[in-house]
């Protein structure tokens, strides 16, 4: 039986990060509020395939939040990320190596999620206010709609 690491996804707010400006905005909000709920960073879909582990590590290096790299079905990228010390990877359930990746995650202390958790994408008008509102809501309660 494959360990299901997905239960971790329900404990935090997830925030999609793809640029240094987004990391800077998140850091400013967290530093300015000194007690924001815990959050984790998540890459855009399949970013592990297109941008790679080194890009994700460099992008998220300035934040203490756990960072999850979406690797799609690329088991090799996911394994590389786990060996590099990422907090976690997201691997499509169609990936046939999921059991091996779950085992590697246990060894490295990381997580291997089977699907992308609900996450807030930074952007749009008044991105900072929308991000603050999202972070104020508990993961178990109603979230501020994110999208347009």
Image (spheres, rainbow, N blue to C red):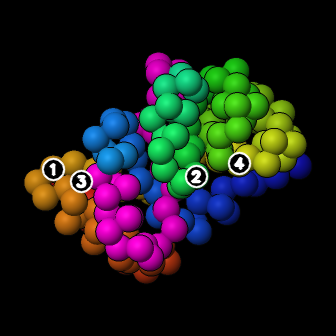
Q: Earlier in the sequence, mark 4 or mark 2?
A: 2
- Rendering coords of residue 147 (x, y %): 24, 53
Residue 7 appears in the figure: yes
Residue 95 appears in the figure: no
Kind of element beneath mark 2:
loop
Kind of element beneath mark 3:
loop
User: Where does label 2 land, which residue?
Assistant: 66
**For the point 51% across and 68% down, which residue is it?**
38
Label disc, if present, on residue 56 of the rendered structure: none
Q: Nearer the viewer, mark 4 or mark 3?
A: 4
**For the point 47% across and 19% down, which residue is it?**
50
**For the point 32% across and 47% down, which residue is it?**
24
The reply to whether callout 4 and callout 3 are in contact (CB within 8 Å) is: no
User: Where does label 3 land, which residue?
Assistant: 147
120 left or right of 38 in image: left
6 left or right of 96 in image: left
Q: CA distance from mark 4 to mark 1?
A: 30 Å
User: Where does label 4 land, which residue?
Assistant: 111
Q: Earlier in the sequence, mark 4 or mark 1?
A: 4
Frontmost residue, 33 versus 43: 33
Residue most toward the left? 125
The picture quadrant where one finds residue 22 is top left
Q: Nearer the viewer, mark 2 or mark 3?
A: 2
Q: Nearer the viewer, mark 4 or mark 2?
A: 2
Relative to 86, residue 4 above or below: below
The reply to whether callout 4 and callout 2 are in contact (CB within 8 Å) is: no
Relative to 123, residue 126 above or below: below
Q: Earlier in the sequence, mark 2 or mark 3?
A: 2
Look at the image and give the residue range highlighted in magenta. 25-51
- Rendering coords of residue 132 (x, y %): 29, 68
The reply to whether callout 2 and callout 1 are in contact (CB within 8 Å) is: no
């Amino acid at each position: 039986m494959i360990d299901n690491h997905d239960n971790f996804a329900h404990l935090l707010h997830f925030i999609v990060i793809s640029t240094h400006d987004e990391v800077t905005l998140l850091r400013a909000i967290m530093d300015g509020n000194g007690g924001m709920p815990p959050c984790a960073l998540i890459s855009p879909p399949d970013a592990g395939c297109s941008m790679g582990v080194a890009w994700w590590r460099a992008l998220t290096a300035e934040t203490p939040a756990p960072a999850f790299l979406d690797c799609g079905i690329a088991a090799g990228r996911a394994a590389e990320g786990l060996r590099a010390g990422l907090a976690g990877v997201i691997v499509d359930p169609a990936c046939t190596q999921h059991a091996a990746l779950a085992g590697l995650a246990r060894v490295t202390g990381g997580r291997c999620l089977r699907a992308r958790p609900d996450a807030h994408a930074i952007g749009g008008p008044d991105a900072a206010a929308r991000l603050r509102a999202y972070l104020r809501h508990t993961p178990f309660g109603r979230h501020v709609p994110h999208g347009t």
